[in-house]
Amino acid sequence: MILFGTKSETLERLERLVKCAIVLPQLQFTAYEWRYRQSEVLEGLKQLSWSGAPLIVRSSAAWEDGTDASYAGCYDSVLNVNGESEVIQAVNRVLASYQDEASVHHVFIQPMLPDVAISGVAFGVNPNNGGNYIVINYDDVSGATDAVTSGTTNHLKTYHYFRGSPLPAGGTLGQIIDLMDELEQIFGTPKLDIEFAVDKAGRLYLFQARPLLLTSDLASLDQQFAILKRIYDKVEQGQARQPYLYGHKTVYGVMPDWNPAEIIGIRPRPLALSLYKELVTDSIWAYQRSQYGYKNVRSFPLLIDFGGFPYIDVRVSFNSFLPKQLDAELSEKLLNYYMQSLIDNPQNHDKVEFEIIFSCFTFDLDTRLEILYEHGFTKPELKQLSLCLKDLTNHIVCTENGLLQNDLSKINELEARRSELLASSIDKVSKIYWLLEDCKRYGTLPFAGLARGGFVAVQMLRSLVSIGILSESDYHRYMSSLETVSTQISIDYAQLAMDDFLAKYGHLRPGTYEICSLRYDEAPEQYFEFSSSSELDRDRVIEKPSFTLSLAQYKRIQALLLEHGLLDGNVLGLFDFFKTAIEGREYSKFVFTKSLSEAIRLFGQLAEECGISKEEASFANIEVIKRAYESDCDIQDLLQGSVKAGKQRYEATLQLELPPLITEPSNVWFFSQPELEPNYITMHQVTSKIVFSHENHESLRGSILFLPSADPGYDWIFSKGIAGLVTMYGGVNSHMAIRAGELSIPAVIGIGESMYNHYGNAKVLAIDCAGKNMRIIQ
């Protein structure tokens, strides 16, 4: 074991000890020696065999890389230095960056490493939460040794390896894991922060090793191993065939189908997670999907809880998208193709309905289905699938079936039932119970149907673009022309007094399922800046683009409808379906969240009556309400027990790391964050500073806003004049995508955790939606 010194001293001590990596030679000297013996330092440099190569002059201040502070990036290092005059300039620049005259500071010079294949940094413990993970951030594209530390790379990759993994990592990253293990033995601690590079010959070099400063306690290795082993076993079990399901294996993702990462986040508190399961993913989702003509997978929960992370069981999801009439043999073959396609293209996990599966008829379906020929499907099989999808879509689109109208009528009934329930004299437990029961039957159930109709509508619209009947701008103009709840919020914000506005929208909260997320009417000043009645712009008109079909477009669509036997060629009926489905989805979400919001509000009151704060109540499981309603159990005991258990579990969740897509059991122990394909909304571009939602409201105006995830409760951001929007999670058909499209705000939806953290470190960002790219300007 050795002790840390300055940056150069630590490397000097490691040079003779480390076996898993190469430490480059160095010339080290103090500020005093440079000031008074500069010629001797330069002469000593000339005597070294490597001094003729390009050099790097590096900082090594006395207090840099200490146990109390790292001062990472505070001092200069100068790369690609050639010749004596450049060395003198570089050393003086490094010394000047120390900003004091202390003679004990060091500077050191090393040869530049040529032919770099990979460079990056690695932490022996997750610096964000103290989890027992070796975290490697690396760049394998640019060839620069400082690509990651300088923040200039657009090719950042992140790899997590659990320190107690029973499986080796292997490959180049396995070399770095071995190096971290060796350094842990040398320093006697896993709390390490290193910089490294690998050359094109596969040799690993160690550039820096320093103490890692943690702001949280180090997690228990044994406890984390036990949790991950249970998850590993569950995932492994999922690779076996399951009765009543097609497909020989499954994968798990946080974004496919009902997008839990977007709605409740990847580490939701227990109350939010249990509410989402109760209201949507335990049974409601499957019941409504079968009503719309798909295979019946009732009794299969869609969402699986892995250590507090909400994952979609993708095999169950994909089974639910198979048309009811599709035969068993083709269903099995199709399911296995879907699954392999997702495994091969993980970047599509937030857009499986658009890029992987065929869940409805579209006007370009025959062309899209041709890819199946490459995977062993036959012409009769494609014909069967096409006919089944056509029948299913006719069932959904045909107004005579009344699917959308029935769902909209249920939503309207929920409004009346909620008012009656809240006005009743029954106790709080009973009110919460019935608010949630009604929310399922008359809220999330019809919403699930309208959401299905919305997906079908968008896919059919996109296919009209694909075959050239509508242009891309036609599509965006049509989407912007729709009258949704979000549009009405903007109008009402300008025209209504505060009390009237909050009476209509006060139930909304940024975290729809989160009790700690304040409703609009609980903290209006946090979300809005209301004008006085004399300043209200009651005549303000929100300019919306108009959309009309040309006669040629109308006739071409009519011919397609007749050709495929849809709606008897009724073009207006088709666009009426589009409008009803897309607007109805947003409206139904707005209405059912009223019941949910009231249930959460009453749950908070009930908890406070039992001496439990809202913060503590967020750790409870909503199942305590059902237990209290159907028994004589003491609600205070139930709540306290549930809160205690939830806290313990959530504390463990915070220190766990799991990938957004689990394709095989080994992903539980180690994984790379996948590079996702973001969803670019509108055809506009913007260059501006970036801000986050918790910052001062005035700073939002004209800025690009970063949000981890977003739902209707975040609609207040659009009243702040933002110039652009970036979210970590979200799909092309999500609320934020639709809202940004309506208002013609350039947005990048669902960029993933790695890219979100990378671009979130910028000061100024450029977004080009038409070109589908983002660039860090500053």
Image (cartoon, rainbow, N blue to C red):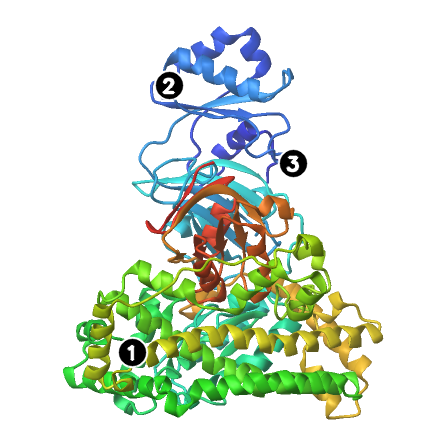
Distance, label 3 to label 1, CA atoms, is: 67 Å
Residue 284: image tag: none
Q: Quadrant of residue 597?
A: bottom right
Query: Pointer 3: what residue?
Result: 69
Q: Is residue 300 visible?
A: no
| Three-letter amino acid code of the residue under disc 1 | Val
Residue 51: image tag: 2
Neighbours of disc 1 within 10 Å: few (<14), some (14-19), many (20+): many
Residue 714 horizontal/vertical position (percent)? 58, 61
Reading the chain from its start, which is encountered first: label 1 or label 2? 2
Mark 1, secondary structure of its residue: helix
| Three-letter amino acid code of the residue under disc 2 | Ser
Neighbours of disc 3 within 10 Å: few (<14), some (14-19), many (20+): few
Query: Pointer 1: what residue?
Result: 571
Residue 37 or residue 748, whichever sits in front: 748
Distance, label 2 to label 3, CA atoms, is: 32 Å
Q: Is residue 762 visible?
A: yes
| Three-letter amino acid code of the residue under disc 3 | Ala
Q: Quadrant of residue 680?
A: bottom left
Distance, label 1 to label 2, CA atoms, is: 77 Å
Does the CB distance between marks 2 and 3 fall below 8 Å?
Answer: no
Residue found at x 51% / y 77% = 303
Residue 217 horizontal/vertical position (percent)? 68, 53
